Image (spheres, rainbow, N blue to C red):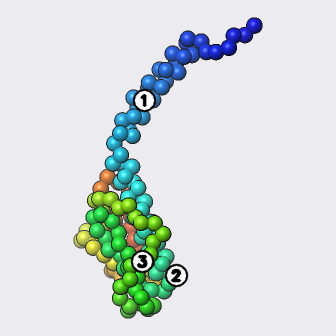
Amino acid sequence: MKSKGFTLVELIVVMVVMGVLAVIAVPRFADQSAFEARGFHDETLALLRFAQKSAIAQRRNVCVSLEAAGVKLEIASSPGSAAACNTALTLANTPRGGTGLSAKDASNNPVGGFSFKPDGGTNLATDISVSITGSIDTITVDKVTGYVF
């Protein structure tokens, strides 16, 4: 006849494993700054890609303002590469934003903003590198194609 339940050894092993996981996992989740930095990085990447795709799809300039707290997008009200950006670009979701965003060109000069042209390229002479404090990854915008990676 087989008895039901767990043995004392099995119970102790499970409790030891749970204790080890608690010691390792809980401190990792206590500091949210790494997760917030990654989220801000991904949000910024998505906004820059959206800006480039909007410029191509609507055949208009899309201006990007890079600020420490996030990215702001504006679109030209009329088509063509000479049109000025004067209308806020409508987004599906409101960006959460973050802190520590900085952008530099190939010569390490700060970049406060740029625009995507109707063909998808940028109006800058060099590629842009966007970095976020706390994130090890950088976002690069290609000057010719506007590709964001």
Q: Residue at x 46, y 81 (%)?
A: 55
Residue 101 at x, y percent in the picture: 30, 62
Query: Which of marks 2 and 1 precedes in the sequence?
Result: 1
Amino acid of disc 1: Ala
Disc number placed over residue 22 in the picture, else none: 1
Q: CA distance from mark 3 to mark 2?
A: 13 Å
Q: CA distance from mark 1 to mark 2?
A: 49 Å
Q: What residue does disc 2 label? A: 57
Amino acid of disc 2: Ala
Helix, strand or loop under label 1: helix
Question: 107 or 120: which is nearer to us?
Answer: 120
**Is 131 above or below relative to 25?**
below
Q: How many residues crowd mark 2 within 10 Å: few (<14), some (14–19), many (20+)? A: few
Question: 76 or 118: which is nearer to us?
Answer: 76
Residue 81 at x, y percent in the picture: 41, 90
For the view shown, which residue lies furthest in the left direction? 109
Q: How many residues crowd mark 3 within 10 Å: few (<14), some (14–19), many (20+)? A: some
Helix, strand or loop under label 3: loop
Q: Does residue 103 appear left or right of residue 51 in this picture?
A: left
**Image marks 1 and 3: residues in contact by CB distance under 8 Å:** no
Q: Residue at x 43, y 91 (%)?
A: 78
Amino acid of disc 3: Leu
Residue 53 at x, y percent in the picture: 49, 76
For the view shown, which residue lies furthest in the top direction? 1
Query: Which of marks 2 and 3 precedes in the sequence?
Result: 2
The image quadrant of residue 117 is: bottom left
Q: CA distance from mark 1 to mark 3?
A: 45 Å
Disc number placed over residue 89 in the picture, else none: 3
